[in-house]
Image: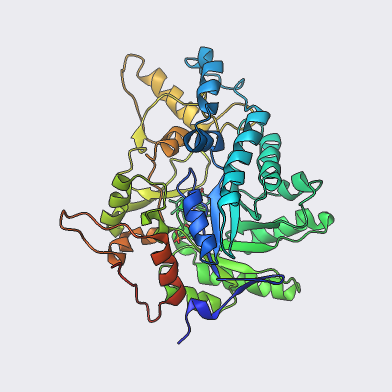
Amino acid sequence: MKRVDDFRLKFGKKELVPIIVGGMGVDISTAELALETARLGGIGHISDAMVPDVSDRRFDTSFVKDKTRFYKYNIDNADKSMIKFDLGVLADATRRHVDATMHAKRGEGMIFVNCMEKLTMNAPRETLQVRMASALDAGIDGITLSAGLHLGSFGLLADHPRFRDAKLGIIVSSVRALQLFLRKNARLNRLPDFVIVEGPLAGGHLGFGMDWAQYDLATIMAEIVLYLKTEQLDIPVIAAGGIFTGSDAVSFLEHGAAAIQVATRFTVANECGLPDKVKQEYFKASEDDIVVNTISPTGYPMRMLKNTPAIGSGIRPGCESYGYLLDGNGNCAYITAYNREVLLHPKAKTLSVMDKTCLCTHMRNYNCWTCGHTTYRLKDTTRRLADGSYQTLSAEHIFKDYQFSIDQRIALPL
Ligand SMILES: Cc1cc2nc3c(=O)[nH]c(=O)nc-3n(C[C@H](O)[C@H](O)[C@H](O)COP(=O)(O)O)c2cc1C
């Protein structure tokens, strides 16, 4: 019977344990989590979502406070089009986050940054270019493009000195999205170094409609592996979404996956950025508590716990401090929904907005409890303590359980 450790992910001459811990913004996949993964020989992700805020927390900078002060005059204005990101600040914050992480790296593994295209930041091209280029400047091993088709993202990096040496890849949820990406980038003569195929059971935003339940990862993987073979393209394909045990992982590795990407099991790791209180909510969840809804202003469905404080919250849009989801014209679906409620209830002291949420503020405050479909199984991965709470686990324990377990077994912590 095979285990994950019988396989290796090959990047040129480099051989890695084929376990990737996926990016989880905002600072849920912390540098500590990514560093542990790299130390153990896999690939860890940090995320550049809301990186000025992450920098403030990690390095005591004051980027968010400064921005809030600068745009304070606009807080009661429904029009957010003038709110822009200072590209110098964005570069500075990204470099700090990446540089400190890369300097702390030990072991044979790698660290990538997760870059979501849907963080349009009221100037989509310029901000994405600065985010990616600054991460490369600061020595990141690779970039995983996510939450978007990224048809122009490679082009934004083509003049960067590390464009051909850093590992660059993309997350897709269909063969069509991959074909589109490859076609649009053909003229750059630079294939992605890896493709992550994310199925419908993943956490965070989904690359499917609300009909997500009709899809399954194994089928999409098979289509993509076959397509690449037919086109004679030798690109490692990585399976993600709902892979809960080492045995689940082995079955993908035996069917053409070069590695697996996992996240949900690591949401209850000591090194994960979620507050302990929230980790307990993840442990306690039953299958009925996990929902996919459309409250994210990005337009993508998102999976979360149904008792997440972000659902129904009618807080004032936080764009003067954040504004990561403003499209290029100062719009965000939450602002529209919020303004509608203000008009309907002009005298109300507090509002409820059911259809959309202020994702920036709620992710920033760990009040949007996004999670994978398998979250309800987390309680089976640990022990219950005398006070009724569940014991959080070390990232090393979870990583090694994926690496060495067989027979659908899950090793409990000591
Ligand atoms: C809490 C949480 C947050 C996530 N945030 C992001 C994100 O910011 N960007 C992204 O590309 N994927 C995100 N994901 C998806 C993961 O990186 C990963 O691909 C997926 O969840 C793997 O499936 P699993 O959770 O079933 O193991 C998130 C997943 C979770 C559980």
Q: Position of residue 24 (x, y in %)?
A: 49, 50
Residue at image position (56%, 48%) is 101
Residue at the extreme left of the image, as rendered? 386
Residue 233 position (above or below residue 37) = below
In the displayed structure image, the side of residue 257 where residue 278 appears, left or right:
left
Residue 145 position (above or below residue 82) = below
Q: How many marks do you count on the picture?
A: 0
Residue at image position (26%, 55%) is 284
Residue at the extreme bottom of the image, as rendered? 1
Residue at image position (67%, 30%) is 87
- Name the image quarter holding the C terminus: bottom left
Q: Position of residue 241 (x, y in %)?
A: 48, 62
- Name the image quarter holding the N terminus: bottom left
Question: Between residues 120 and 236, which one lies in front from this camera angle?
Answer: 236
Q: Position of residue 333 (x, y in %)?
A: 51, 33
Q: Position of residue 39 (x, y in %)?
A: 52, 62
Q: How was this image coloured?
A: rainbow
Question: Residue 146: in sight, yes or no?
Answer: no
Question: Between residues 183 and 152, which one lies in front from this camera angle?
Answer: 152
Question: Residue 188: in sight, yes or no?
Answer: yes
Residue 411 position (above or below residue 291) = below
Residue at image position (38%, 81%) is 407
Question: Between residues 235 and 105, which one lies in front from this camera angle?
Answer: 105
In the displayed structure image, the side of residue 188 where residue 343 appears, left or right:
left
